Amino acid sequence: MAKIVITGGGAPLDGSVRISGAKNAVLPILASTLLSDGPVIIGNVPHLNDVTTTMELLGQMGVQLVVDERMKIHVDPRSIHSFFAPYDLVKTMRASVLVLGPLLARYGEAVVSLPGGCAIGSRPVNLHIKGLAALGADIQVEGGYIRARAKRLKGAHIVLDIQTVTGTENIMMAAVLAKGTTTIENAAQEPEVVDLANCLNAMGADIEGAGSRTIVIHGVDRLAGCEYDVLPDRIETGTFLVAAAITRGRVKVKNTRPDILESVLLKLEEAGAEITCGDDWIECDMHGRRPRAVDITTAPYPAFPTDMQAQFSALNTIAEGVATITETVFENRFMHVHELRRLGADIRLEGNTAVTRGVDHLNAAPVMATDLRASASLVLAGLVAEGETVVDRIYHIDRGYDCIEEKLAQLGARIRRLPGTDQDELQAAQA
Protein backbone atom coordinates (compact mmCIF):
# COMPACT_ATOMS: atom_id res chain seq x y z
CA MET A 1 0.00 0.00 0.00
CA ALA A 2 1.31 3.46 -0.90
CA LYS A 3 2.78 5.57 1.90
CA ILE A 4 4.02 9.11 2.39
CA VAL A 5 7.36 9.55 4.15
CA ILE A 6 8.22 12.89 5.76
CA THR A 7 11.59 13.81 7.26
CA GLY A 8 10.57 16.52 9.68
CA GLY A 9 12.14 19.05 11.98
CA GLY A 10 13.84 20.92 9.15
CA ALA A 11 13.65 24.46 7.82
CA PRO A 12 10.34 26.36 7.79
CA LEU A 13 8.30 26.06 4.61
CA ASP A 14 8.79 28.96 2.25
CA GLY A 15 7.41 29.77 -1.18
CA SER A 16 4.17 29.76 -3.13
CA VAL A 17 1.73 27.09 -4.24
CA ARG A 18 -1.24 26.99 -6.60
CA ILE A 19 -4.56 25.78 -5.21
CA SER A 20 -6.63 23.29 -7.19
CA GLY A 21 -10.35 23.29 -7.84
CA ALA A 22 -12.65 22.37 -4.96
CA LYS A 23 -13.35 18.68 -4.46
CA ASN A 24 -16.65 19.44 -2.71
CA ALA A 25 -17.78 21.61 -5.62
CA VAL A 26 -16.69 19.55 -8.62
CA LEU A 27 -18.45 16.37 -7.46
CA PRO A 28 -21.99 17.84 -7.33
CA ILE A 29 -21.29 19.81 -10.51
CA LEU A 30 -20.37 16.57 -12.29
CA ALA A 31 -23.62 15.05 -11.02
CA SER A 32 -25.57 18.10 -12.21
CA THR A 33 -24.54 17.45 -15.81
CA LEU A 34 -27.13 14.66 -15.83
CA LEU A 35 -29.78 17.40 -15.89
CA SER A 36 -28.57 18.91 -19.15
CA ASP A 37 -29.80 18.06 -22.63
CA GLY A 38 -26.48 19.13 -24.11
CA PRO A 39 -22.72 18.89 -23.46
CA VAL A 40 -21.18 20.56 -20.39
CA ILE A 41 -17.51 21.56 -20.09
CA ILE A 42 -16.08 21.76 -16.57
CA GLY A 43 -12.80 23.57 -15.92
CA ASN A 44 -10.42 23.95 -12.95
CA VAL A 45 -10.97 20.28 -12.13
CA PRO A 46 -8.61 18.79 -9.51
CA HIS A 47 -6.86 15.48 -10.19
CA LEU A 48 -8.41 13.43 -7.37
CA ASN A 49 -9.52 9.86 -6.83
CA ASP A 50 -13.06 11.05 -6.02
CA VAL A 51 -13.26 12.83 -9.39
CA THR A 52 -12.11 9.66 -11.14
CA THR A 53 -14.71 7.62 -9.25
CA THR A 54 -17.48 10.06 -10.19
CA MET A 55 -16.44 9.94 -13.83
CA GLU A 56 -16.45 6.14 -13.69
CA LEU A 57 -19.93 6.19 -12.19
CA LEU A 58 -21.27 8.50 -14.90
CA GLY A 59 -19.49 6.45 -17.55
CA GLN A 60 -21.17 3.26 -16.36
CA MET A 61 -24.50 5.01 -16.89
CA GLY A 62 -23.56 5.66 -20.52
CA VAL A 63 -22.46 9.29 -20.19
CA GLN A 64 -19.63 10.26 -22.53
CA LEU A 65 -16.66 11.94 -20.79
CA VAL A 66 -13.45 13.28 -22.31
CA VAL A 67 -10.58 15.10 -20.58
CA ASP A 68 -8.87 17.56 -22.95
CA GLU A 69 -5.31 18.90 -22.99
CA ARG A 70 -6.37 21.80 -20.73
CA MET A 71 -7.61 19.29 -18.10
CA LYS A 72 -11.21 20.31 -18.72
CA ILE A 73 -13.84 17.57 -18.57
CA HIS A 74 -16.28 17.44 -21.49
CA VAL A 75 -19.47 15.69 -20.36
CA ASP A 76 -22.18 14.61 -22.80
CA PRO A 77 -25.12 13.06 -20.90
CA ARG A 78 -27.25 12.45 -24.01
CA SER A 79 -25.99 8.86 -24.39
CA ILE A 80 -27.13 7.80 -20.90
CA HIS A 81 -28.81 4.39 -20.83
CA SER A 82 -28.74 3.40 -17.15
CA PHE A 83 -30.06 5.09 -14.03
CA PHE A 84 -28.25 2.81 -11.57
CA ALA A 85 -25.45 3.72 -9.12
CA PRO A 86 -23.97 0.44 -7.81
CA TYR A 87 -22.67 -0.30 -4.35
CA ASP A 88 -19.11 -1.05 -5.48
CA LEU A 89 -18.64 2.59 -6.54
CA VAL A 90 -20.92 4.41 -4.11
CA LYS A 91 -19.40 2.70 -1.05
CA THR A 92 -16.06 4.44 -1.65
CA MET A 93 -17.47 7.96 -1.92
CA ARG A 94 -20.47 9.45 -0.19
CA ALA A 95 -20.94 12.15 -2.83
CA SER A 96 -22.16 9.47 -5.26
CA VAL A 97 -25.61 9.89 -3.73
CA LEU A 98 -25.75 13.25 -5.55
CA VAL A 99 -26.80 11.52 -8.77
CA LEU A 100 -30.14 10.69 -7.12
CA GLY A 101 -31.80 14.10 -7.52
CA PRO A 102 -30.67 14.74 -11.12
CA LEU A 103 -31.64 11.26 -12.34
CA LEU A 104 -35.05 11.54 -10.74
CA ALA A 105 -35.73 15.02 -12.12
CA ARG A 106 -34.46 14.38 -15.65
CA TYR A 107 -35.42 10.75 -16.24
CA GLY A 108 -38.05 9.98 -13.61
CA GLU A 109 -36.23 7.06 -12.03
CA ALA A 110 -33.09 6.20 -10.09
CA VAL A 111 -31.63 3.30 -8.15
CA VAL A 112 -28.74 4.47 -5.99
CA SER A 113 -26.83 2.53 -3.36
CA LEU A 114 -26.74 3.92 0.15
CA PRO A 115 -23.45 5.83 0.36
CA GLY A 116 -20.10 5.24 2.01
CA GLY A 117 -17.07 7.54 2.25
CA CYS A 118 -14.93 8.48 5.24
CA ALA A 119 -15.73 6.76 8.53
CA ILE A 120 -16.19 10.00 10.48
CA GLY A 121 -19.66 9.39 11.84
CA SER A 122 -23.26 8.95 10.87
CA ARG A 123 -24.31 10.98 7.84
CA PRO A 124 -27.81 9.72 7.06
CA VAL A 125 -29.54 10.41 3.77
CA ASN A 126 -32.98 10.65 5.33
CA LEU A 127 -33.12 14.40 4.65
CA HIS A 128 -32.40 13.79 0.97
CA ILE A 129 -35.22 11.25 0.82
CA LYS A 130 -37.64 13.43 2.77
CA GLY A 131 -36.97 16.43 0.50
CA LEU A 132 -37.36 14.45 -2.73
CA ALA A 133 -40.55 12.88 -1.42
CA ALA A 134 -41.90 16.37 -0.75
CA LEU A 135 -41.31 17.11 -4.44
CA GLY A 136 -43.54 14.17 -5.33
CA ALA A 137 -41.11 11.26 -5.66
CA ASP A 138 -42.09 7.73 -4.68
CA ILE A 139 -39.07 6.45 -2.75
CA GLN A 140 -38.33 3.10 -1.12
CA VAL A 141 -35.17 1.96 0.64
CA GLU A 142 -34.58 -1.76 0.38
CA GLY A 143 -31.64 -4.09 0.03
CA GLY A 144 -29.18 -1.27 0.64
CA TYR A 145 -30.51 0.78 -2.28
CA ILE A 146 -32.63 3.91 -2.66
CA ARG A 147 -35.24 3.23 -5.35
CA ALA A 148 -37.01 6.35 -6.58
CA ARG A 149 -39.62 7.07 -9.25
CA ALA A 150 -41.58 10.12 -10.28
CA LYS A 151 -43.34 11.69 -13.18
CA ARG A 152 -42.54 15.39 -13.30
CA LEU A 153 -41.65 16.61 -9.82
CA LYS A 154 -43.64 19.47 -8.34
CA GLY A 155 -42.36 22.45 -6.38
CA ALA A 156 -42.69 22.35 -2.60
CA HIS A 157 -41.80 24.21 0.57
CA ILE A 158 -39.07 22.18 2.30
CA VAL A 159 -37.69 22.85 5.77
CA LEU A 160 -34.52 20.90 6.54
CA ASP A 161 -34.24 19.64 10.11
CA ILE A 162 -30.52 20.34 10.07
CA GLN A 163 -28.23 22.07 7.59
CA THR A 164 -26.92 19.45 5.19
CA VAL A 165 -24.68 20.28 2.24
CA THR A 166 -25.34 17.24 0.07
CA GLY A 167 -29.01 17.22 1.10
CA THR A 168 -29.40 20.84 0.00
CA GLU A 169 -27.59 20.09 -3.26
CA ASN A 170 -29.61 16.97 -4.09
CA ILE A 171 -32.93 18.72 -3.47
CA MET A 172 -31.83 21.83 -5.36
CA MET A 173 -30.80 19.79 -8.40
CA ALA A 174 -34.09 17.89 -8.38
CA ALA A 175 -36.10 21.10 -8.04
CA VAL A 176 -34.61 22.89 -11.06
CA LEU A 177 -36.75 20.79 -13.43
CA ALA A 178 -39.79 20.54 -11.13
CA LYS A 179 -43.05 22.23 -12.06
CA GLY A 180 -43.50 25.38 -10.00
CA THR A 181 -41.40 26.93 -7.26
CA THR A 182 -39.46 25.15 -4.53
CA THR A 183 -38.24 26.84 -1.35
CA ILE A 184 -35.55 25.22 0.80
CA GLU A 185 -35.45 26.61 4.33
CA ASN A 186 -32.45 26.09 6.65
CA ALA A 187 -30.38 25.42 3.55
CA ALA A 188 -26.63 24.89 3.74
CA GLN A 189 -24.73 28.11 3.02
CA GLU A 190 -21.37 26.64 2.00
CA PRO A 191 -19.55 28.21 -0.99
CA GLU A 192 -19.71 24.85 -2.78
CA VAL A 193 -23.53 25.05 -2.69
CA VAL A 194 -23.29 28.51 -4.25
CA ASP A 195 -20.91 27.20 -6.90
CA LEU A 196 -23.36 24.44 -7.83
CA ALA A 197 -26.21 26.96 -8.04
CA ASN A 198 -24.10 29.22 -10.26
CA CYS A 199 -23.33 26.31 -12.58
CA LEU A 200 -27.00 25.30 -12.74
CA ASN A 201 -27.98 28.89 -13.52
CA ALA A 202 -25.38 28.91 -16.30
CA MET A 203 -27.25 25.89 -17.73
CA GLY A 204 -30.51 27.81 -17.61
CA ALA A 205 -31.84 27.13 -14.12
CA ASP A 206 -33.56 29.86 -12.09
CA ILE A 207 -32.14 29.73 -8.55
CA GLU A 208 -32.16 32.58 -6.05
CA GLY A 209 -30.70 32.91 -2.57
CA ALA A 210 -27.86 30.37 -2.74
CA GLY A 211 -25.45 31.20 0.07
CA SER A 212 -28.30 32.20 2.40
CA ARG A 213 -30.48 30.00 4.59
CA THR A 214 -33.38 30.25 2.12
CA ILE A 215 -32.96 29.06 -1.46
CA VAL A 216 -35.76 29.57 -3.99
CA ILE A 217 -35.81 27.50 -7.17
CA HIS A 218 -38.21 28.32 -9.98
CA GLY A 219 -38.57 25.19 -12.07
CA VAL A 220 -37.76 25.32 -15.79
CA ASP A 221 -38.57 22.93 -18.62
CA ARG A 222 -35.00 22.14 -19.67
CA LEU A 223 -31.35 22.84 -19.02
CA ALA A 224 -28.79 23.35 -21.78
CA GLY A 225 -25.06 22.77 -21.92
CA CYS A 226 -22.56 25.34 -20.66
CA GLU A 227 -18.89 25.85 -19.79
CA TYR A 228 -18.10 26.43 -16.13
CA ASP A 229 -14.96 26.68 -13.96
CA VAL A 230 -15.05 25.20 -10.45
CA LEU A 231 -14.16 27.50 -7.54
CA PRO A 232 -10.83 27.04 -5.67
CA ASP A 233 -10.65 24.54 -2.82
CA ARG A 234 -10.89 26.41 0.47
CA ILE A 235 -9.88 23.33 2.51
CA GLU A 236 -6.73 22.73 0.48
CA THR A 237 -6.03 26.45 0.88
CA GLY A 238 -6.43 26.23 4.65
CA THR A 239 -4.28 23.12 4.86
CA PHE A 240 -1.31 24.80 3.16
CA LEU A 241 -1.71 27.90 5.34
CA VAL A 242 -1.59 25.68 8.43
CA ALA A 243 1.51 24.01 6.96
CA ALA A 244 3.15 27.44 7.00
CA ALA A 245 2.03 28.11 10.57
CA ILE A 246 3.08 24.75 12.01
CA THR A 247 6.58 25.01 10.49
CA ARG A 248 6.97 28.70 11.47
CA GLY A 249 7.29 29.49 7.78
CA ARG A 250 5.91 31.71 5.05
CA VAL A 251 3.62 30.38 2.32
CA LYS A 252 1.66 32.22 -0.36
CA VAL A 253 -1.29 30.31 -1.81
CA LYS A 254 -2.42 31.40 -5.27
CA ASN A 255 -5.58 30.87 -7.33
CA THR A 256 -7.74 30.94 -4.21
CA ARG A 257 -10.44 33.10 -2.59
CA PRO A 258 -9.91 34.79 0.79
CA ASP A 259 -13.60 35.68 1.07
CA ILE A 260 -14.66 32.03 1.59
CA LEU A 261 -12.08 31.29 4.30
CA GLU A 262 -12.56 34.11 6.80
CA SER A 263 -13.11 31.93 9.90
CA VAL A 264 -9.88 30.02 9.23
CA LEU A 265 -7.86 33.19 8.56
CA LEU A 266 -9.03 34.69 11.84
CA LYS A 267 -7.84 31.60 13.74
CA LEU A 268 -4.47 31.72 12.00
CA GLU A 269 -4.08 35.34 13.05
CA GLU A 270 -5.03 34.31 16.58
CA ALA A 271 -2.25 31.72 16.37
CA GLY A 272 0.22 34.51 15.64
CA ALA A 273 0.38 34.47 11.85
CA GLU A 274 0.57 37.60 9.74
CA ILE A 275 -2.10 37.16 7.07
CA THR A 276 -2.13 39.29 3.93
CA CYS A 277 -4.57 38.85 1.05
CA GLY A 278 -5.21 39.88 -2.53
CA ASP A 279 -8.15 39.15 -4.78
CA ASP A 280 -6.95 35.60 -5.52
CA TRP A 281 -4.09 34.95 -3.07
CA ILE A 282 -3.36 34.65 0.64
CA GLU A 283 0.01 34.74 2.39
CA CYS A 284 0.65 33.32 5.87
CA ASP A 285 3.91 34.44 7.51
CA MET A 286 4.92 33.29 11.00
CA HIS A 287 8.21 35.26 10.96
CA GLY A 288 9.89 32.26 12.59
CA ARG A 289 7.66 32.40 15.67
CA ARG A 290 6.13 29.44 17.47
CA PRO A 291 2.33 29.44 16.98
CA ARG A 292 -0.05 30.03 19.87
CA ALA A 293 -2.70 27.44 20.70
CA VAL A 294 -6.21 28.37 19.54
CA ASP A 295 -9.67 27.33 20.75
CA ILE A 296 -12.05 26.18 18.02
CA THR A 297 -15.65 25.06 17.74
CA THR A 298 -16.73 23.63 14.40
CA ALA A 299 -20.10 24.53 12.89
CA PRO A 300 -21.70 24.92 9.45
CA TYR A 301 -20.50 27.73 7.17
CA PRO A 302 -19.75 30.58 7.71
CA ALA A 303 -18.44 29.31 11.06
CA PHE A 304 -15.24 27.28 11.40
CA PRO A 305 -15.34 24.25 9.04
CA THR A 306 -15.22 20.72 10.37
CA ASP A 307 -12.94 19.88 7.43
CA MET A 308 -10.20 22.09 8.99
CA GLN A 309 -10.52 20.69 12.51
CA ALA A 310 -7.89 17.96 12.16
CA GLN A 311 -5.31 20.35 10.67
CA PHE A 312 -5.67 22.75 13.61
CA SER A 313 -5.49 19.78 15.97
CA ALA A 314 -2.02 19.14 14.52
CA LEU A 315 -1.11 22.82 14.87
CA ASN A 316 -2.11 22.87 18.53
CA THR A 317 0.15 19.91 19.33
CA ILE A 318 3.30 22.06 19.03
CA ALA A 319 1.75 25.45 19.84
CA GLU A 320 2.37 27.50 22.94
CA GLY A 321 -0.34 27.01 25.56
CA VAL A 322 -3.45 24.89 26.08
CA ALA A 323 -6.47 24.93 23.76
CA THR A 324 -9.73 23.08 23.20
CA ILE A 325 -11.26 21.98 19.92
CA THR A 326 -14.96 21.08 20.02
CA GLU A 327 -16.46 19.10 17.14
CA THR A 328 -20.20 19.70 16.68
CA VAL A 329 -20.73 18.45 13.11
CA PHE A 330 -19.60 14.79 13.20
CA GLU A 331 -19.55 12.58 16.28
CA ASN A 332 -16.56 10.44 15.28
CA ARG A 333 -14.03 12.90 13.91
CA PHE A 334 -11.20 12.65 16.42
CA MET A 335 -9.65 9.41 15.19
CA HIS A 336 -6.50 11.32 14.24
CA VAL A 337 -5.94 12.15 17.93
CA HIS A 338 -4.71 8.63 18.71
CA GLU A 339 -2.22 8.82 15.84
CA LEU A 340 -1.00 12.29 16.89
CA ARG A 341 -0.33 10.86 20.35
CA ARG A 342 2.02 8.35 18.72
CA LEU A 343 4.12 11.34 17.68
CA GLY A 344 4.22 12.63 21.26
CA ALA A 345 1.23 14.98 21.28
CA ASP A 346 -0.39 15.75 24.65
CA ILE A 347 -4.11 15.50 23.82
CA ARG A 348 -6.98 14.50 26.09
CA LEU A 349 -10.43 13.66 24.72
CA GLU A 350 -13.50 14.70 26.70
CA GLY A 351 -16.55 13.65 24.71
CA ASN A 352 -16.67 15.80 21.57
CA THR A 353 -13.81 18.04 22.77
CA ALA A 354 -10.06 17.60 22.43
CA VAL A 355 -7.91 19.39 25.00
CA THR A 356 -4.33 19.89 23.77
CA ARG A 357 -1.31 21.10 25.68
CA GLY A 358 1.37 22.12 23.22
CA VAL A 359 4.74 20.36 23.49
CA ASP A 360 8.17 21.64 22.44
CA HIS A 361 8.60 19.04 19.74
CA LEU A 362 7.13 15.87 18.26
CA ASN A 363 9.00 12.66 17.49
CA ALA A 364 8.57 10.70 14.28
CA ALA A 365 6.67 7.42 14.27
CA PRO A 366 4.68 5.27 11.84
CA VAL A 367 1.07 6.48 11.74
CA MET A 368 -2.07 5.45 9.87
CA ALA A 369 -4.60 7.70 8.16
CA THR A 370 -8.22 7.01 9.11
CA ASP A 371 -10.04 9.52 6.90
CA LEU A 372 -9.35 12.30 4.41
CA ARG A 373 -8.72 15.27 6.72
CA ALA A 374 -7.08 13.10 9.40
CA SER A 375 -4.50 12.09 6.82
CA ALA A 376 -3.72 15.75 6.16
CA SER A 377 -3.22 16.38 9.88
CA LEU A 378 -0.69 13.54 10.11
CA VAL A 379 1.28 14.91 7.17
CA LEU A 380 1.32 18.35 8.82
CA ALA A 381 2.51 16.87 12.12
CA GLY A 382 5.15 14.90 10.24
CA LEU A 383 6.58 18.14 8.87
CA VAL A 384 7.71 19.14 12.38
CA ALA A 385 8.29 15.75 14.03
CA GLU A 386 11.98 14.94 14.58
CA GLY A 387 12.96 12.01 12.37
CA GLU A 388 11.15 10.11 9.63
CA THR A 389 7.35 9.82 9.85
CA VAL A 390 5.63 7.24 7.65
CA VAL A 391 1.94 7.85 6.93
CA ASP A 392 0.11 4.70 5.82
CA ARG A 393 -3.26 4.30 4.06
CA ILE A 394 -2.79 7.50 2.09
CA TYR A 395 -5.49 6.56 -0.40
CA HIS A 396 -7.59 8.73 1.93
CA ILE A 397 -5.51 11.83 1.18
CA ASP A 398 -5.67 11.19 -2.57
CA ARG A 399 -9.45 11.56 -2.35
CA GLY A 400 -9.15 15.25 -1.54
CA TYR A 401 -5.64 16.62 -2.19
CA ASP A 402 -4.12 17.04 -5.64
CA CYS A 403 -0.43 16.00 -5.49
CA ILE A 404 0.03 17.12 -1.88
CA GLU A 405 3.55 15.73 -1.55
CA GLU A 406 4.71 17.49 -4.73
CA LYS A 407 3.24 20.82 -3.61
CA LEU A 408 4.80 20.53 -0.14
CA ALA A 409 8.15 19.57 -1.67
CA GLN A 410 8.19 22.74 -3.77
CA LEU A 411 7.82 24.67 -0.49
CA GLY A 412 10.89 22.96 0.95
CA ALA A 413 9.40 19.95 2.73
CA ARG A 414 11.42 16.74 2.73
CA ILE A 415 8.61 14.45 1.66
CA ARG A 416 8.22 11.58 -0.75
CA ARG A 417 5.72 8.93 -1.75
CA LEU A 418 6.43 5.21 -1.61
CA PRO A 419 4.21 3.56 -4.21
CA GLY A 420 2.18 0.46 -3.46
CA THR A 421 1.33 -2.36 -5.82
CA ASP A 422 -1.79 -2.34 -8.00
CA GLN A 423 -3.23 -5.07 -5.78
CA ASP A 424 -2.59 -2.94 -2.68
CA GLU A 425 -4.45 -0.01 -4.20
CA LEU A 426 -7.37 -2.23 -5.25
CA GLN A 427 -7.67 -3.59 -1.72
CA ALA A 428 -7.44 -0.07 -0.27
CA ALA A 429 -10.21 1.21 -2.52
CA GLN A 430 -12.42 -1.69 -1.45
CA ALA A 431 -11.71 -1.24 2.27
Image (tube, rainbow, N blue to C red):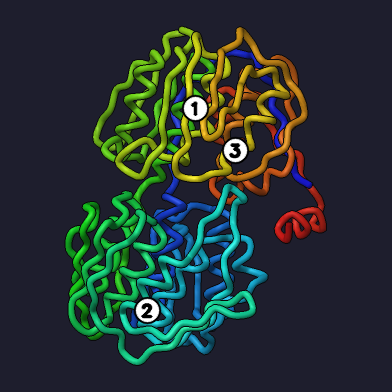
Seen at 40% across and 39% down, the residue is 305
Q: What residue type is labelled 3?
A: Ala
Mark 1 and mark 2 lie on one chain; the one further toward the N terminus is 2
Give how far apart the Cα atoms at labels 3 and 2 are. 35 Å
Q: Dot 1, crowdedness within 10 Å: few (<14), some or many (≥20)?
A: many
Give how far apart the Cα atoms at labels 3 and 1 are. 11 Å
Seen at 39% across and 59% down, the residue is 43
Q: Is residue 267 above or below residue 22?
A: above
Q: What residue type is labelled 2?
A: Ala
Q: Which corner quadrant of the image does residue 219 belong to?
A: bottom left
Q: Name the residue under label 1.
A: 312
Q: Mark 3 points at which residue?
A: 374
Q: Which corner quadrant of the image does residue 262 belong to?
A: top left
| Secondary structure of residue under mark 1 | helix
In front: label 1 or label 2 = 2
Give the mark count: 3
Q: Is residue 64 above or below residue 388?
A: below
Q: Name the residue under label 2.
A: 133
In the rendered structure, are the residues bearing label 3 and label 2 in contact, judged by CB atoms less than 8 Å apart? no
Mark 3 and mark 2 lie on one chain; the one further toward the N terminus is 2
Give how far apart the Cα atoms at labels 1 and 2 are. 39 Å
Q: Can residue 59 be seen?
A: no
Whole-percent x and y of residue 374?
60, 38
Whole-percent x and y of residue 72?
43, 61
In front: label 3 or label 2 = 2
| Secondary structure of residue under mark 2 | helix
